[in-house]
Amino acid sequence: VPALNGMPVTWQVGAVSLTLDGIGVLLATVVLILGFIVTLYSMRYMQWEVGEEKFYALLVAMTGTIVGLGCATDLFNLWVWFEAMAITSYMLVAFYRLQPASLEAGVKYLVQSASGSVLVLLGVALVFAQSGTLDLAAIRAGEGSGVPAIYLAAGALFLIGFGVKVALVPLHTWLPDAHSQAPSGISAMLSGVVIEAGLIALLRVLGSLAGVSNSWGIFLLGFGAINMLLGNLMALRQDQVKRLLAYSSVSHIGYILVGIGVAAAFGSQAGAAGGFFHIVTHALMKGLAFLSAGTLLYVLYLSKGSHNPL
């Protein structure tokens, strides 16, 4: 694969350009593997559920939008792929729409994520107003011609907006409810891939603004430390397995942020390698953990007519 040898592959469709580089290959590989596993898992888990055909359509759409997000080369199309991914995940989180807790989790996720998307769009507008382009490489090359304060404001908007999807503390409050109320296959996708896709999007845009300030790495380190601390402490208090795994995901995002933050702040290639390696290990580990929890809940439901083991 040329992308693995440092030679990105580019597709041009009209004015839209998609580039498959090393990060895009990593994200695409993870989402396709986990998406295939979740599809096989859901054949029995979702059998006879109302709207089963919509479940699979949305799952395929989510997988495709995440692949597209990893290949986006300009800010606007990155936002479009990000929004398309978010829309599919909203509906999948609230798939059991007749259950009040599931509907509440879906609405909470929708409100917080949509608010973050608005902030991202405002950041895109600020960058375009200063640079006159949306191409990520061109933005990075032409940063000196703009006003640094405007780029810093845009970077802050990106950090908050994408941070909702990445579950940066204190923007993580939607995650435990969404992961615990969604079908177990979707919990695996949310924890294993969707929050990592949001992280990739955040790193893409902050990378284009890296020349404005060297403080982005410090911010990532700070958020990483907070995520590790709060995620692990909150996981200790949980008595529901899916909520425990959800808070574990908050802490693991912290581990990834620390590795990438060290790379951004101090130029450590080992930190970047460790951070991206843990994206793969966390996706597979947490995805399989949610599927295992779902299997337990499914067996309890079949044997007792309830998810409560007591």
Image: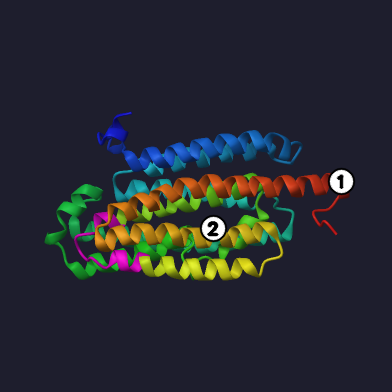
> What type is the residue that disc 1 sits on?
Ser
Please report contact status of discs 2 and 1: CB closer than 8 Å, yes or no: no
The residue depicted at 50 percent of the width and 58 percent of the height is: 252
Q: Residue at x 29, y 37 (%)?
A: 17
Query: Who's the residue at 60% across and 69% down the image?
Result: 234
- Mark 1 Cα within 10 Å, few/some/many (few <14, many 20+)? few
Judge from the rendering whether residue 201 lies leftward or rightward of residue 234; answer left or right: left
Q: Nearer the viewer, residue 215 or 62?
A: 215
Q: In this rendered view, identify the residue nearer to me: 292 or 156.
A: 292
Expressed as whole percent of the image width and height from the top left, the position of residue 10 reads 28, 33
Tell me where residue 90 appears, x and y as whole percent. Answer: 57, 52
Q: Amino acid at mark 2?
A: Ser
Tell me the number on the disc at residue 203.
none
Q: Is residue 210 visible?
A: yes
Estimate the spatial distance between the alpha carbons at disc 2 and disc 1, rounded to whole Å.
30 Å
Mark 2 or 1, nearer chain start: 2
Residue 216 belongs to the span the image colors magenta = yes
* Residue matched to label 1: 303
x and y, in percent, of residue 235 in the image: 61, 66
In this rendering, the answer to whether 114 lies above or below 74 is below
Along the horizontal axis of the image, is 243 left or right of 160?
right
Q: Which residues are magenta?
A: 206-220
- Toward the viewer: 145 or 187? 187
What SS does tag 1 mark?
A: helix
Instruction: Give the residue furthest to the right.
Output: 304
Residue highlighted by disc 2: 249
